[in-house]
Image: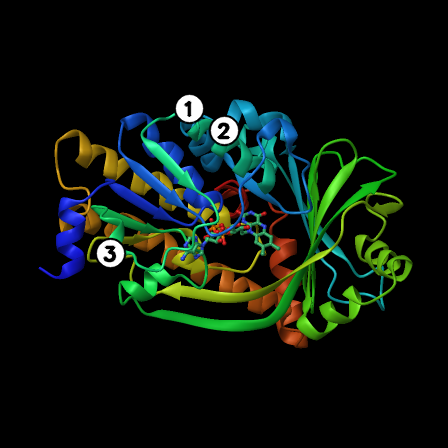
Amino acid sequence: MNKFDTACRTGKPDIAIIGGGPAGFTLAALLAPAGIRVLLADSSGSTPSLKNVTPDGRTAALMGGSIDTLTAAGVWPLLESYASPLRRMAVVDDSRFPANPDAMIEQGFAAHELGRDAFGWNMSLTAMRAALNDVLKTHKNVTVRFDTTVTDFASLGASLIVGCDGRDSKVRDFAGIGVKRHAYGQSAITCLIRHSQPHLDTSTEFHRPGGPFTIVPCRNDTSAIVWVEKTDDAQRFLKLPKPRFVEELQSRTRDYVGTIELISSPACWPLEYVRSTKLTGPRVALAAEAAHVISPIGAQGLNLSLRDVSTLAGIIIQAFEIGLDVGSATVLDRYEKARTPDVASRSFAIDFMNQAVANDKNAVRALRRLALRALSLPGPWRQLVMKKGLAA
Ligand SMILES: Cc1cc2nc3c(=O)[nH]c(=O)nc-3n(C[C@H](O)[C@H](O)[C@H](O)COP(=O)(O)OP(=O)(O)OC[C@H]3O[C@@H](n4cnc5c(N)ncnc54)[C@H](O)[C@@H]3O)c2cc1C
């Protein structure tokens, strides 16, 4: 037994969560009602309470399973009024942009085809973090420490350390878990727009050689933009004077939502693929972007992460209730086995899709357009894409 192992066995709290992004906060809120002693440490600043939050340009489209997780975490009733339903999803092959505006192929999917009211909800991540923190304040067994960068993990004395500390996870390094990563050479520009025509609760993803450009509905005739370009081009667009930037943005919307107005400062996110070689190490579990980072195409990243934390919370609570050591190899093995297939298949599929969309070879483009057309045929293929690709 090493020094770390000894400290963890004798010390408190039961679980130390490193990283207070949406995943870390959700895990803490899922564990809190079970009476488990949780320490959540986050190096970024504190959050105002939900009633004082002004949503910014960062949103995430969260599908049905993620909403169930937020309900279990006790925050969905608080967040519903900050989220917008996604009742229709459209995928548009716009690979001939900007030369040929008539060469778009659009495929629409409606939630009612699956017998649902909505595929999911588009959520302000700032509001989500604030709501989760508000809920955690009501649990005496949970301590949240903002502005705290943990470097000495062993000294925390927790039975289990959960790394929710993002793509450059230090918990991952500490546990000696390897990582596979490659940069896409793309960056995502995000911002909020107001528009003259309603979005009709439709999320529209245009596929172009630079990457996907997505209009995601928000409340009151506003939408979030996720605009992926090659990094050099993204930097060039961000340096434009505001009117020219808005012009570029307007042309990319293909006027789907009428005339647009920029209502938040654009932000930029470098995109890469990251996957840890394992999800667990001695008394360590990795979740969310500490374990996998995928392209925003298809809006899957946080959905995948919330499945991690939901599964992990279930396994921990079950172990805790029967008196099992929550950091034991038995518990960690269960988590590893339960999450690896979903993480592996989803990471592979999104990586493949991102590379296929960014590939401008004529043959690949023709195949892509054919596949999109084929999705108009009713039947099991279309249902499968909707269930696994849009609603999961
Ligand atoms: C442009 C874009 C659009 C996206 N859209 C969607 C979408 O529509 N749907 C979807 O499902 N997903 C989407 N995603 C993915 C989603 O936004 C991310 O997966 C999610 O925000 C990451 O959350 P996280 O909690 O894993 O990590 P982070 O938010 O990165 O949180 C990690 C936290 O750990 C803290 N930290 C790091 N090291 C330490 C330390 N040593 N000690 C203490 N704290 C530490 C950091 O300060 C940070 O607060 C999108 C991503 C991008 C880039």
Q: Are dots 3 and 1 in contact, CB under 8 Å?
A: no
Residue annotated with mark 1: 138
Residue 117 in sight: no
Q: Are dots 2 and 1 in contact, CB under 8 Å?
A: yes
Q: Is mark 3 within 8 Å of ligand 1?
A: no
The amino acid pointed to by label 3 is Ala
Q: Is mark 2 within 8 Å of ligand 1?
A: no
Q: Residues within 10 Å of mark 1 (few under 14, many from 20)?
A: few
Place residue 358 in its image quadrant. Answer: bottom right
The mark closer to the camera, 2 or 3, is 3
Residue annotated with mark 3: 154
* Relative image position of residue 65 (x, y in whole percent): 45, 36
Q: Residues within 10 Å of mark 2 (few under 14, many from 20)?
A: some
Residue annotated with mark 2: 134
**How far, Cα to Cα, is label 2 from label 3?**
29 Å
Is 241 placed left or right of 37 in the picture?
right
* Relative image position of residue 34 (x, y in whole percent): 28, 27
**How far, Cα to Cα, is label 3 from label 1?**
28 Å
The amino acid pointed to by label 2 is Asp
Residue 312 in sight: yes
